[in-house]
Image (spheres, coloured by chain):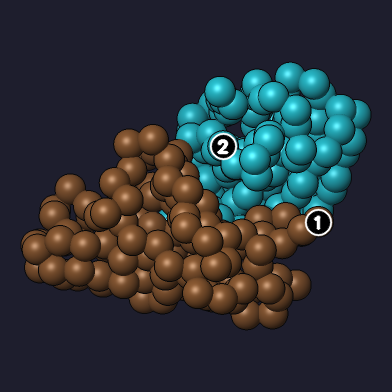
Amino acid sequence: GAVVSQHPSRVICKSGTSVKIECRSLDFQATTMFWYRQFPKQSLMLMATSNEGSKATYEQGVEKDKFLINHASLTLSTLTVTSAHPEDSSFYICSATRQDYGYTFGSGTRLTVV
Amino acid sequence: EDQVTQSPEALRLQEGESSSLNCSYTVSGLRGLFWYRQDPGKGPEFLFTLYSAGEEKEKERLKATLTKKESFLHITAPKPEDSATYLCAVSGGYQKVTFGIGTKLQVIP
């Protein structure tokens, strides 16, 4: 089956620093990867969609200069939260898909900005 | 804009007490309706994909059904290990997936 690995699972950083989250498809090549954010008792909210080798498409209200997405290969996408603030504390989840496949999710990253 | 509404928000069942979770949706050109299970602090775990009205899928104690406006996740004789949040999502055009807020299920021994 399709497996997506996401690292780290938990990270605590100081306000003003940057944090990088990795999302890897382990046994398939993902044509598209997605990044979501989930606040407590709320639904997963799509932040951006990325295709390998092209710029990510951000959802309305998501700052592209704050949430940098790099999709360097068909198996790796990274999300960098730049100049993190406490309000960026959340649960970030990636998912990956390929043609005719469903969406496979990573295990998520709990980011806490102090 | 695609929308997904799940009900109830929370459900508490006795072990063995069967019930159903509802997912109502509006989408432009349904490509797929998905059910996921999410445990606290974890990413969603795939359960089912349904593509067209009338389709049904089963997995152990779970059965998902689909109509043109809603989907049901039926849980038969649930066990405590079925306790989780169950998420419904739809995919319309442009590969965008829209999630509901989920139903938090608690099964009491």
Q: Please state the horizontal and vertical placement of residue B63, each as a whole percent of the image.
A: 80, 42
Q: Which SS class for mark 1? A: loop
**What is the chain identity of the residue bearing mark 2?**
B
- Dot 2: few (<14), some (14–19), or many (≥20) neighbours within 10 Å? many
Q: Which SS class for mark 2? A: strand
Q: Colour of chain A?
A: brown
Q: Which mark is residue A57?
A: none
Number of numbered discs overlaid on the protein picture? 2
Q: Which mark is residue B98?
A: 2
Residue annotated with mark 1? A100
Q: For the point 35% across and 56% down, which residue is it? A: A91
Dots 2, 1 in contact, CB < 8 A: no
Q: Please state the horizontal and vertical placement of residue B35, each as a whole percent of the image.
A: 67, 44
Is residue B54 shown to the viewer in this render? yes
Q: For the point 75% across and 28% down, which residue is it? A: B29
- Name the amino acid, label 2: Thr
- Does B64 sit left or right of A13 as displayed? right
**What is the chain identity of the residue bearing mark 1?**
A
Q: Is residue A89 above or below residue A45?
A: below
